[in-house]
Amino acid sequence: MILSSALQAIGLFIATNIDDIIVLSLFFARGSGRSGTTARILAGQYLGFAGILAAAVLVSLGAGVFLPEEAIPYFGLIPLALGLWAGWQAWREGDDDDDEAKVAGKSVAVWTVAAVTFANGGDNIGVYVPVFLTVGAAATAAYCAVFLILVAVLVQLARFVATRPGIKEVLERWEHVLFPSVLIGLGIVILYSGGAFGI
């Protein structure tokens, strides 16, 4: 029973978080060469994911009043705003023809990683709530424990991807374009797929 729950939790985590590898890899590219980047990304991922789990548990316990289902698509405004801000900063610095300056690491803030992680977790919440409702309190706690262990694995996997030769160079060279583009796209997808545009 415990092994079965753990395997189900692993499968559920992979299904709902595989897309985070791309976003986290871009965070690693953004903070390349800066000390403490991995620790800040890990802390941000844990904070954001803890928010996702807290929301899913609260909703499954009947606290839907605090987080109505209709509000979840509007989490897309967070990466959209962060992407627009990053794009504006990249455009403002675009006059600098110094390639070294363009690939130089920028500081990655814990709160930025946490906000993007939480905003990208609307689908997680939507999937976790019905699971938590059906498995009971003990299994929900076990799922959450497995998820929290896997967060560290996910961050290390993204770091591994972001530091592979070839991938690393592309990410660092084009991070100033890819980072805001992915965040803006992520925000629009979250808003659109959640029905925020009334479509």
Image (cartoon, rainbow, N blue to C red):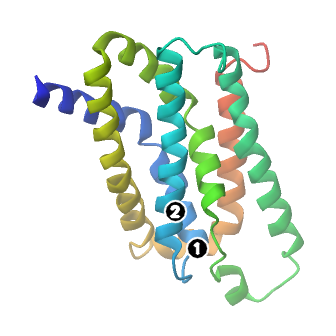
- Horizontal side of residue 139 vs 183, given as left or right: left
Please tell me whether mark 1 sits on a helix, a strand or a loop: loop
Quarter occupied by residue 31? bottom right
Question: What kind of residue is marked 1?
Answer: Gly
**Can you tell which of label 2 and label 1 is closer to the viewer?**
2
* Looking at the image, residue 179 lies above or below residue 173: above
The residue nearer to you, when weighing 23 against 181, is 23
The residue nearer to you, when weighing 51 against 130, is 51
Q: Tell me the residue at 14%/26% (across/down).
A: 4
The alpha-carbon separation of the residues under discs 2 and 1 comes to: 9 Å
Mark 2 and mark 1 lie on one chain; the one further toward the N terminus is 1
- Tag 1: Cα neighbours inside 10 Å, few (<14), some, or many (≥20)? many
| Percent position of residue 167, x then y | 46, 69
Q: Which residue is mark 2?
A: 41
| Percent position of residue 163, x then y | 42, 73
Please tell me whether mark 2 sits on a helix, a strand or a loop: helix
Whether the residues at callouts 2 and 1 have beta carbons within 8 Å, the answer is yes
* Looking at the image, residue 67 lies above or below residue 103: above
In the rendered structure, find residue 31 and report the number of the disc placed on it: 1
- Horizontal side of residue 162 vs 108, given as left or right: left
- Horizontal side of residue 153 vs 118, given as left or right: left
| Percent position of residue 46, x then y | 47, 51
Question: What kind of residue is marked 2?
Answer: Ile
In the rendered structure, find residue 199 and report the number of the disc placed on it: none
* Looking at the image, residue 19 lies above or below residue 142: below
Locate the N terminus by quadrant.
top left
Q: Tell me the residue at 66%/13% (across/down).
A: 65
Q: Tell me the residue at 62%/75% (across/down).
A: 173
- Tag 2: Cα neighbours inside 10 Å, few (<14), some, or many (≥20)? many
